[in-house]
Image: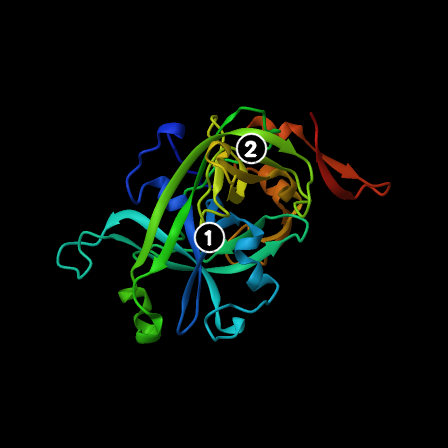
Amino acid sequence: MLDKHIEIETGFLEYGGDFGDLCHQTVLPIFAMSQKNMIPLGTGFVIASSGLLMTARHVVEDFVDKKEIRDTGEPIENFRLYVLHVSDKKHPNGSPFAGNNIGGPILITRIYTDPNLDIAIGWIQALHNVENGEPLSFPSVKLGFSAPILDENILGIGYHSSAFSVPMSKVDVSDVKKHVEYSRKFTTTTGTVAEVIGSQGFRKWPHFRSSAKFEPGMSGGPVFLENGSVSGVICSSISGGAEDEGYISYVSEIWPALSFDLDVVLQNGEDPQKLTLLEMVQQNLVKSDDSLKKIETIVNEFGKVVGIKRSL
């Protein structure tokens, strides 16, 4: 397991990073791809340098629940999930892609979900140095588990109105990585915490309402606090209906996802071990702020951990 961590810097409310910077390398578009079609789905973000990704469950639920993919005429079994990665390095002069950032699709190899949360966690395929074969680290965010505070400032990041510019039916699958251009609009939005909600309606998980405007495609993106940590996942946003009502936006709190059981390879060549996300944080494999001390485990009479809770 790689333990290298590169903490991204958003500048918070004044983010103005360049394409391919650490933020772009950490917050990634998610899409589904088959031999004939590519479908933009939403946004995810890296939470461990080894390629652990977090997103919203509803972004990937069609694939988790084996539902029908609309408007493609293809069975869901034909599709696999990917993120689109972009680096800060450029293709060299003389290349057909000279001046463009190096990057491309990376397969999501495993997805973990909880039907009671709008959060999903997945592994993305490891990248390796083409010269020496060594695994490469992904920049990652720092997680936060504190309870949201009314009127606290937040920053949401995601990919809005993503689309593919080349009809996939006209592209040979062997040329997909070379010839398909992915049109992405990197979007940031700011607002405040407007209401803290434990459970409401179909949202039966801890979440909060924000004044921020989350555009379509931003679902699954990270929500930053001013201390630089990510405490939430973009859930949904709808218009308030009247100009003075703004947007009604919801953010899933991250801390309940600490109970996820994950398959983790700690050393190259070893079999995966079962670790919870909480254990990964405790072992410093996933970075967090000092709010981890607010998280407590619930133990049964036999000493087995059966749940987690957050203290005030």
Q: Closer to the camera, 122 or 43?
A: 43
Which residue position holds label 1? 42
Please give left or right for residue 131 compared with residue 309 in the image.
Answer: left
Query: Residue 151: where, in percent of width, then height?
Result: 54, 24
Residue at point 59%, 67% (across, down): 66
Query: Residue 126: where, in percent of width, then height?
Result: 44, 56
Question: Residue lying farthest left?
Answer: 94
Q: Closer to the camera, 257 or 136?
A: 257
SS assignment at label 1: strand
> In the figure, 149 relative to 133: above or below?
above
> In the figure, 171 relative to 61: above or below?
below
Please give left or right for residue 215 compared with residue 298 in the image.
Answer: left
Q: Closer to the camera, 117 or 273?
A: 117
Amino acid under label 1?
Gly
SS assignment at label 2: loop
Which quarter of the picture shows residue 299?
top right
Which residue position holds label 2? 144
Q: Is residue 138 visible?
A: no
> In the figure, 50 relative to 309: above or below?
below
Query: Residue 215: where, in percent of width, then height?
Result: 44, 45
Query: Residue 240: where, in percent of width, then height?
Result: 52, 39
Earlier-in-chain disc, 2 versus 1: 1
Q: Quadrant of the C terminus?
A: top right
Residue at point 62%, 29% (across, down): 147
Q: Can residue 310 be seen in this view?
A: yes
Give me the C-alpha separation between circle 2 and circle 1. 22 Å
Which quarter of the picture shows residue 7?
top left
